[in-house]
Image: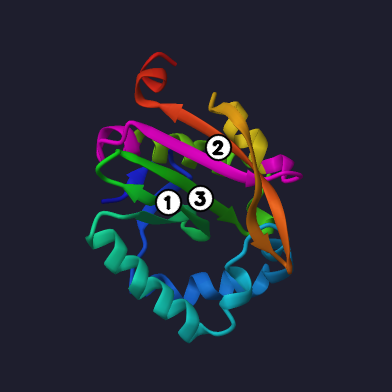
């Protein structure tokens, strides 16, 4: 099911047909993306991303993630989804990225708002997190604009580019979202 945000932005469920175009976007933005995203170095060729899409589809079928491609004016601009879904405890974590030329247009804020709504209403989640590296001010601003609460810093929360980095942890509860 597509999530139509406005005339310019649509979230489309990730499918095998997206593998080539999304990998091309990754390749064109490799240095930009690898600054903050751990998985970029593992996507060395189209086959790597095709395997990722297949694995992601299996996790989606099992209810452990809800992966989408972000379309901006019909062009693939990036990805967003809810990952690490814990069904018994009803929580998940939003992850997102955009190609560099698509930044600064409000795409991620609007997409994150839509995916949060989807997580609470369609997936029945009670808690949604956004985690981002300390120093990644753009991602931090997304969580803050949406009213996610800053819970603290997860020390050495991720291994990125050969070193452990700290992560900001933000959260939103369904009852808080309803009061926005």
Among the 4 quarters of the image, the one containing residue 31: bottom right
Compared to residue 120, the image places residue 100 above or below, namely: below
Query: Which residues make up the magenta segment?
Result: 118-138
CB within 8 Å, label 3 to label 1: yes
Dot in front, 2 or 1: 1
In the image, 20 versus 44, the foreground residue is 44
| Residue wearing tag 2 | 109
Residue found farthest to the front: 155
Q: Which mark is residue 17?
A: none
Image quadrant for the C terminus? top left
Q: Earlier in the sequence, mark 2 or mark 1?
A: 1
How far apart are the alpha carbons under marks 2 and 1? 13 Å
- Front in this rendered view, residue 88 or 67: 88
Residue 36 lies, in percent from the top left, at: 68, 57
Circles 2 and 1: CB atoms closer than 8 Å: no
Q: Residues within 10 Å of mark 3 (few under 14, many from 20)?
A: some
| Relative horizontal placement of residue 137, taking residue 171 as reference (left or right) | right
In primary-sequence order, the first of circles 3 and 2 is 3
Residue pictured at 23% horizontal, 60% vertical: 62
Q: Check if residue 54 falls in the magenta segment.
A: no
8 up-or-down from 68: above or below:
above
The residue singled out by tag 3 in the image is 95
Element class at badge 3: strand
Report x, y in % for residue 7. Answer: 44, 41
């Amino acid at each position: 099911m597509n999530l139509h945000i406005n005339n310019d932005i649509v979230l489309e469920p990730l499918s095998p047909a997206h593998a080539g175009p999304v990998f091309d976007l990754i390749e064109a933005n490799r240095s930009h993306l690898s600054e903050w995203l751990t998985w970029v170095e593992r996507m060395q060729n189209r086959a790597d991303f095709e395997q990722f899409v297949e694995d992601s589809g299996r996790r989606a079928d099992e209810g452990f993630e809800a992966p989408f491609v972000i379309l901006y004016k019909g062009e693939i601009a990036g990805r967003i989804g809810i990952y690490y879904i814990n069904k018994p405890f009803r929580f998940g974590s939003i992850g997102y990225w955009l190609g560099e030329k698509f930044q600064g247009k409000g795409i991620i804020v609007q997409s994150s708002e839509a995916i949060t709504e989807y997580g609470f209403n369609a997936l029945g989640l009670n808690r949604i997190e956004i985690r981002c590296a300390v120093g990644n001010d753009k991602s931090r601003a997304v969580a803050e604009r949406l009213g996610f609460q800053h819970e603290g810093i997860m020390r050495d929360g991720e291994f990125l580019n050969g070193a452990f980095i700290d992560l900001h942890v933000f959260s939103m509860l369904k009852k808080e979202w309803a009061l926005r």
